[in-house]
C-alpha cells in the first residue's frame, strides 16, 4: 500500500515538474508581460501578493482544460449559446474549456478567489455590470465555440494552421487537434491590455471583425 501510494506521488510530481517546465520553458514566461497585466483589470491582487495565481498555478492544476496549468474552479452555471437561422457553421451546445476559464469570472457566479490551489490570496469579489457578459447567458454575444469553416460560407477569410490572420483558433473539447474553434481567446489576449478591452488587435475601422468576415 505505502509503496504504491508513493509511486503515485512520484509520478504526479514528475508530471508536475514536466508541466512546470513546459509552462515556464517552452511557452516562454518572458513572453507574458507581467508588468502589463499589473494594474490592468486582470490584476486581481489585493496587496501585490500575486497576479498569475488568480488564473494559473505551477502545482496541482486542473488538467481537463486546454489552458496551461489552470487554477480556477469551473462554474456550474448553465449558459445559453448563440443561435440564429442564418448561422452556417456548427456551434457546440456548451462553451469550450478555454472559454469556460474566462466565464469562471465573467458569468458573475463565482468569486475571483475560487481557486483550485490557493497559496493564501484573498479577493472574494464577484463580477457585476457589463463585464459579466455571461450573467444573462451567451445568446446575445458573438458566437463562441463555433467551428471556423469558410467552406460553409464564402464570406470568411481562409484559416491557416489554426489561425485566421493573427487570431488563434482552439481545439474542440475532447479532441487533440486541429484547432478549429472560435473562443473568447481568439479575439482577446487576457495578458495584454494595450489595445483596450484586452483585444488581440485594434478594432479601429472594424479591422478585428474584417480579419474573419469578408464582406
Ligand atoms: C485573468 C486570467 C489570467 C491571468 C491573470 C494570467 N493568465 Fe496566463 N493565460 C490565461 C489564459 C486564459 C490562457 C490561455 C488562452 C490564451 O492564450 O488566451 C493563458 C495562457 C498563458 C500562457 C501560455 C502561452 C500563451 O500566452 O498563450 C502563459 C505562459 C501564461 N498564460 C503565463 C501567465 C503569467 C506568467 C501570468 C502572470 C503574470 C498570467 N499568465 C496571468 C489566463 C490568465
Ligand atoms: C480571475 C477572474 C477573471 C478571469 C478568469 C478573466 N477575467 Fe476578464 N476581467 C476580470 C475583471 C475583475 C475585470 C474587470 C471588471 C470590471 O471592471 O467590472 C475583467 C475585465 C475584462 C475585460 C474588459 C477590460 C477593460 O479594459 O475594460 C475583458 C475584455 C475581459 N476581462 C476578457 C476576458 C477574457 C477573454 C478572459 C478569458 C480568456 C477573461 N477575461 C478571464 C476578471 C477575470
Ligand atoms: C469575435 C471576437 C470576440 C469574441 C469571440 C469575444 N469577444 Fe469580447 N469583445 C470583443 C470586442 C471587439 C469587444 C469591444 C467592445 C465592443 O465592441 O463591443 C469586446 C468586449 C468584451 C468585454 C467588455 C464588455 C464591456 O461592456 O465592458 C468583455 C468583458 C468581453 N469582451 C469578454 C469576452 C468573453 C468572456 C468572451 C467569451 C465568452 C468574449 N469576450 C468573446 C470581441 C470578442
Ligand atoms: C475569428 C474570426 C471572427 C472574428 C474576428 C469575428 N467574427 Fe463574427 N463570426 C465568426 C464566425 C465563424 C461566425 C459564424 C458564421 C456562420 O455560422 O455563418 C460569426 C458570426 C457573426 C455574426 C452572426 C451571423 C449570423 O448569421 O447570425 C455576427 C453579427 C458577427 N459575426 C459579427 C462580428 C463582428 C461585429 C465582429 C467584430 C467585433 C466579428 N464578428 C468578429 C467569426 C468571426
Image (tube, rainbow, N blue to C red):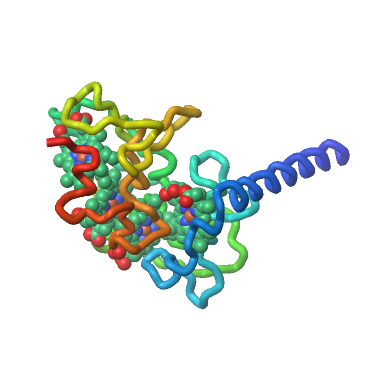
Position of residue 149 measured from the top left corner of the image (x, y, whole percent): 28, 27
Q: Residue at 31% of width from left, 48% of height from top?
A: 187
**Vertical arrangement, residue 31 with respect to residue 47, above or below:** above
The answer to whether one can see residue 27 in this image is yes
Position of residue 196 measured from the top left corner of the image (x, y, whole percent): 28, 62
**Vertical arrangement, residue 121 with respect to residue 147, above or below:** below
Q: Report the front residue among 40 and 158.
A: 158
Q: Quadrant of ligand 4?
A: top left
Position of residue 152 measured from the top left corner of the image (x, y, whole percent): 22, 22
Q: Report the front residue among 185 and 126.
A: 185
Q: Quadrant of residue 182?
A: top left
Relative to 141, 101 lies left or right: right
**Vertical arrangement, residue 89 with respect to residue 110, above or below:** above
The answer to whether one can see residue 139 in this image is no
Q: Quadrant of residue 50?
A: bottom right
The quadrant of the rendering that contains the N terminus is top right
Q: Residue at 69% of width from left, 42% of height from top?
A: 15
Relative to 109, 176 lies left or right: right
Furthest residue toward top: 151
The quadrant of the rendering that contains the C terminus is top left
Relative to 154, 72 lies left or right: right
Q: Report the front residue among 202 and 43.
A: 202
Q: Residue at 49% of width from left, 65% of height from top?
A: 34
Q: Residue at 29% of width from left, 60% of height from top?
A: 197
**Vertical arrangement, residue 202 with respect to residue 167, above or below:** below
Amino acid at each position: 500500500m505505502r509503496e504504491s501510494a508513493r509511486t503515485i506521488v512520484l509520478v504526479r510530481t514528475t508530471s508536475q515538474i514536466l508541466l512546470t517546465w513546459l509552462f515556464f520553458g517552452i511557452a516562454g514566461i518572458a513572453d507574458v508581460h507581467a508588468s502589463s497585466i499589473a494594474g490592468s483589470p486582470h490584476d486581481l491582487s489585493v496587496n501585490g501578493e500575486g497576479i498569475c495565481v488568480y488564473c494559473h498555478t505551477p502545482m496541482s492544476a486542473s488538467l481537463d482544460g486546454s489552458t496551461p496549468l489552470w487554477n480556477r474552479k469551473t462554474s456550474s452555471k448553465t449558459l445559453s449559446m448563440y443561435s440564429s437561422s442564418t448561422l452556417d457553421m456548427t456551434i457546440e451546445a456548451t462553451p469550450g474549456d478555454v472559454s469556460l476559464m474566462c466565464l469562471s469570472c465573467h458569468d458573475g457566479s463565482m468569486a475571483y478567489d475560487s481557486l483550485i490551489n490557493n497559496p493564501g490570496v484573498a479577493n472574494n469579489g464577484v463580477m457585476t455590470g457589463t463585464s459579466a457578459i455571461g450573467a444573462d447567458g451567451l445568446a446575445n454575444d458573438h458566437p463562441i465555440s463555433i467551428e471556423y469553416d469558410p467552406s460553409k460560407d464564402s464570406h470568411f477569410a481562409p484559416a491557416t494552421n489554426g489561425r485566421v490572420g493573427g487570431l488563434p483558433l482552439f481545439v474542440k473539447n475532447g479532441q487533440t487537434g486541429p484547432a478549429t474553434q472560435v473562443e473568447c481567446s481568439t479575439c482577446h489576449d487576457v495578458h495584454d491590455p494595450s489595445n483596450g478591452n484586452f483585444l488581440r488587435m485594434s478594432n479601429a475601422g472594424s479591422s478585428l471583425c474584417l480579419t474573419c468576415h469578408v464582406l
